Every structure is written in structure tokens, then in C-alpha cells.
Amino acid sequence: MKVTPSYEIRYHGPTNDVAMVNIQQSKREEWIKQTSFRIDQFLSRLGNGRAGKDQRDIIIKRYLEDEDVCDYMVYSEIGMSVRIDVLRLEYFINLLLLLD
């Protein structure tokens, strides 16, 4: 005798677990897409002068490229001194305020 599978909903079954993971993954991807768009907007709104270029360079090189980059490496690559650390903090706060 062959038993037909039941069509009732099983909230604790493996299919439900997979569906929940897929929903969470799609929400996470949407959040990443929105955050990336907002960061791109922020970076494009920075001024075209020296300060705006420095802000863009610091944020991109320190936070959006390689993860294993130290501050002094970024500063030497840009040609800034390490005492500009106060400006870096200010630029990062501007970015956080945008994302809030």
C-alpha cells in the first residue's frame, strides 16, 4: 500500500526552514542594496574641492575597499599626515549621520 504525503502545513519542517532562510536572505540583500545606494549618494554629494576629494578618498580606501588596511597606510597612499585623524573621524560621522 502506498501512502500519499499530507498537504497540511508543517511550520517546523525542513521546507519551512529553507523558506525562512530565503526570505531573510532576500531582506538582507535588499538592505545591502539600499545602504550601498545611500553611500554612493553621500559620496557623490561631497564637494569637488580638496576637502571633498580627501573625504571621498579616505572613506573609500579605508571602509569600502580592503578590510585589512590600516589608517597610516591610507594616509600615506593619499599623501596626508596621520594627524588628520580628527578629520577622518569627522568624515566618518558625516557618513553615519547620512545612514541613520
Image: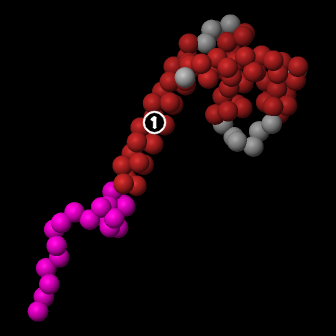
Residue in the foreground of this view, choosing between 2 and 54: 2
Q: Type of residue at label 1? A: Trp
Picture quarter with the C terminus:
top right
Can residue 54 be spotted in the picture? no
Instruction: Return the residue found at the far left.
Output: 1
Q: Position of residue 33 (x, y in %)?
A: 45, 34
Q: Position of residue 35 (x, y in %)?
A: 50, 30
Q: Residue at x 70, y 31 (%)?
A: 61
Quadrant of residue 65 within the rendered picture:
top right
Quadrant of residue 55 within the rendered picture:
top right
In the rendered structure, does residue 10 fall within the stretch colored magenta? yes
The range drawn in magenta is 1-19
Q: Position of residue 12 (x, y in %)?
A: 34, 64
- How crowded pointer 1 is (Cα within 10 Å; few <14, some 14-19, many 20+) is rated as few
> 22 above or below 12?
above
Q: Position of residue 42 (x, y in %)?
A: 56, 18
Residue in the foreground of this view, choosing between 50 and 25: 25
Can residue 26 be spotted in the picture? yes
> 67 above or below 86?
below
The chief SS type of the magenta part is: loop
Q: Residue at x 45, y 42 (%)?
A: 28
The residue labelled by disc 1 is 31
Residue 24 as seen in the image, left or right of residue 15: right
Regarding mark 1 in the picture, which secondary structure is present there?
helix
In the rendered structure, does residue 26 fall within the stretch colored magenta? no
Q: Residue at x 68, y 7 (%)?
A: 49
